[in-house]
């Protein structure tokens, strides 16, 4: 259904209501590694947050292919996404995490404290380039 980073209207509607996902990256031997993550749309692009030292970050630096399983409101509603990931980890990574937080949860109680925590935790952004979507959504 999707080609490129921006999602279509049907996918956007689903993703705006559902942010809980399972992210699957590939170990060096090709076996899957899964982690539960929060995803959200930021300016039409699908993002999630991670850190420099996460296992999935190491996997994605070697092989940017990634699967996402986005959970719906019930067990019958779901979206699968085949993606490649760009890691955004430059000097603006804390600000990008603030954009993600605002898209997913609103305004943090203390913006300065939040930004300092993002720097301390070595936070980065995973930006998903969606190649294909499927599922029941």
Image: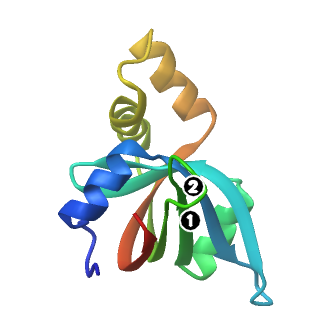
Quarter of the image with the C terminus is bottom left
Q: Position of residue 122 (x, y in %)?
A: 59, 42
Q: Is residue 51 visible?
A: no
Q: For the point 74% across and 78% down, which residue is it?
A: 32
The quadrant in which residue 128 appears is: bottom left
- Residue 36 seen in render: yes
In the image, residue 114 sits, relative to residue 88, either above or below, namely above
Q: Is residue 10 left or right of residue 94?
A: left
Pointer 1: what residue? 69
Numbered mark located on residue 93 in the image:
none
Is residue 121 left or right of 128 when viewed as pictured?
Answer: right
Which one is nearer the viewer's eye here, 120 or 6?
Answer: 6
Kind of element beneath mark 2? strand
The residue lying at 22 percent from left, 55 percent from top is: 44
Tell which of 112 and 105 is nearer to you. 105
In which quadrant is the N terminus drawn? bottom left
Where does label 2 land, which residue? 21
Q: Are marks 1 and 2 in contact (CB under 8 Å)?
A: yes
């Amino acid at each position: 259904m999707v080609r490129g980073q921006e999602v279509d209207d049907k996918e956007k509607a689903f993703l705006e209501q559902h942010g809980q996902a399972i992210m699957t990256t590939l170990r060096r031997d090709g076996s899957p590694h899964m982690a539960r993550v929060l995803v959200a749309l930021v300016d039409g692009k699908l993002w999630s947050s991670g850190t420099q030292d996460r296992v999935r970050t190491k996997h994605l630096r070697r092989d940017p292919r990634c699967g996402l399983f986005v959970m719906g409101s019930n067990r019958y509603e779901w979206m699968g996404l085949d993606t490649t990931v760009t890691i955004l980890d430059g000097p603006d990574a804390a600000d990008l995490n603030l954009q993600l937080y605002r898209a997913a949860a609103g305004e943090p109680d203390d913006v300065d404290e939040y930004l300092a925590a993002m720097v301390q935790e070595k936070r980065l952004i995973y930006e998903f380039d969606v190649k294909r979507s499927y599922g029941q959504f």
